[in-house]
Image: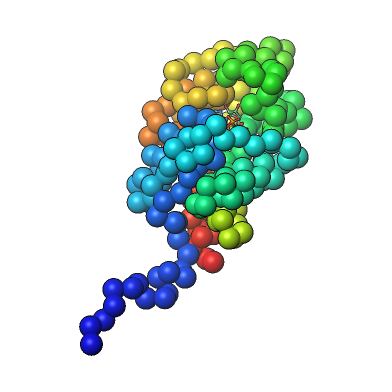
C-alpha cells in the first residue's frame, strides 16, 4: 500500500504563520513594510484590494488592540482567509499620549500625513528638547474565518524632531527621531527601519505567540 502525501497531523496543528494571509489595511506604507518583513519568512501577504475591493471598517475601538481586532475579524469574515489587522500610531509624552489611537485623524477626518505632522510640530513648538519623548505603538491581530484570534504588540521609543527630515517611510516617520542614530525614521533605509520598528517588534511577538499555540 502506498503512503498518502497528507502532512502529518502535527504539522497541521502546530503553530506558525499561515502560508498566505490578507492584510486588513488601506495604508500602502504598512502593506509595503509587512509584505517585506513576512516575505523573508515565506508568508505571502495579499493586499485587501485584491480580495475585497473598497474594504473599510469603522475604527470605533478605544485602544490600538481593539481596532486591530476589529479590522482582522471583519476581513477574515468577508474574505474567508486568515486576515491580519494593524492599528498603530504615535504617543507623545508632552501631549499626555496623544494623538494615540487618533493618529490617522489627528488633523481631521481625511487629514494627510503632511497635515498631521504639521499639527504635531505646531503643538510642540514650545516644548524643549528634553521633553519631546514619544513612542510608536503597533497592535496586531491575526484572525481566521473560524473565529480563532492571535494578538501581539510592539513599541519603539524616540523623540519628536523640530522639523521634518528625510523622505523614507510614511506617516510621522520624518519627525520621529531614533535615539540610537539621531536620524528620523524618514532618513533611515526601509531595511533599517524594518530591523527594529514597532511593527517589526509586533510581528516578532506575533510569531512567538503563533509558535506557542
Ligand atoms: P488602516 O486603518 O487602513 O490600516 P491607517 O493609516 O488609517 O490605515 P491607523 O488607523 O492604524 O492606520 O493609523 C495609523 C496612524 O499612525 C497613521 O496616521 C500612520 O501614518 C501612523 N503610523 C503608523 N505606523 C507608522 C509608522 O511606522 N511610521 C509613521 N507613521 C505611522
Residue 56 horizontal side relative to residue 93, left or right: left
Q: Is residue 72 visible?
A: no
Residue 92 against residue 9 in the figure, above or below: above
Of 81 and 101, the residue lying toward us: 81
Type of colouring: rainbow
Total labels: the figure holds 0
Q: Quadrant of residue 131?
A: top right
User: Quarter-wise, where is residue 145 in the image?
Assistant: bottom right
Residue placed most toward the observer, 182 or 142:
142
Task: Name the residue located 50 percent from the left edge and 24 percent from the top edge.
Answer: 170
Taking the image as shown, residue 188 lies to the left or right of residue 141, namely left
Instruction: State which quarter of the image contains the N terminus.
Output: bottom left
Q: Is residue 207 above or below residue 70?
A: below
Indicate the position of residue 27 as horizontal and vertical percent values. Answer: 52, 30
State the image coordinates of residue 81 (x, y, percent, origin top left): 50, 52
Splitting the image into 4 quarters, where does residue 127 fall?
top right
Residue 86 visible (yes or no): yes
Residue 64, percent from left and from top = 67, 41
Residue 122 vs 179, above or below: the answer is: above
Quarter of the image for the C terminus: give it: bottom right
Q: Residue furthest bottom?
A: 1
Residue 191 image position (x, y, % from top left) = 38, 34
Q: Quadrant of ligand 1?
A: top right
> Is residue 199 or residue 19 the one in the foreground?
19
- Residue at position x 62%, y 49% from top? 73
* Residue displayed at 73% across by 37% down: 60
Residue beneath the point at 39% across and 50% down? 43
Amino acid at each position: 500500500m502506498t503512503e498518502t502525501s497528507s502532512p502529518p497531523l502535527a504539522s497541521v496543528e502546530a503553530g506558525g504563520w499561515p502560508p498566505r494571509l490578507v492584510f486588513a489595511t488601506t495604508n500602502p506604507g504598512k502593506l509595503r513594510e509587512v509584505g517585506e518583513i513576512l516575505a523573508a519568512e515565506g508568508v505571502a501577504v495579499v493586499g485587501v484590494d485584491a480580495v475585497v475591493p473598497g474594504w473599510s471598517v469603522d475604527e470605533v475601538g478605544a485602544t490600538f488592540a481593539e481596532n486591530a481586532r476589529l479590522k482582522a475579524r471583519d476581513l477574515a469574515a468577508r474574505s474567508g482567509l486568515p486576515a491580519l489587522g494593524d492599528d498603530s500610531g504615535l504617543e507623545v509624552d508632552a501631549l499626555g499620549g496623544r494623538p494615540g489611537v487618533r493618529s490617522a485623524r489627528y488633523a481631521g477626518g481625511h487629514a494627510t500625513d503632511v497635515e498631521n505632522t504639521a499639527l504635531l510640530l505646531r503643538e510642540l513648538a514650545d516644548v524643549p528638547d528634553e521633553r519631546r519623548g514619544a513612542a510608536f505603538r503597533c497592535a496586531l491581530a491575526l484572525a481566521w474565518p473560524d473565529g480563532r484570534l492571535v494578538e501581539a504588540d510592539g513599541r519603539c521609543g524616540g523623540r519628536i524632531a523640530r522639523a521634518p527630515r528625510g523622505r523614507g517611510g510614511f506617516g510621522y516617520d520624518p519627525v520621529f527621531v531614533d535615539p540610537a542614530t539621531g536620524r528620523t525614521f524618514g532618513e533611515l533605509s526601509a531595511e533599517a527601519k524594518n530591523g527594529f520598528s514597532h511593527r517589526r517588534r509586533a510581528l516578532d511577538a506575533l510569531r512567538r505567540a503563533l509558535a506557542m499555540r
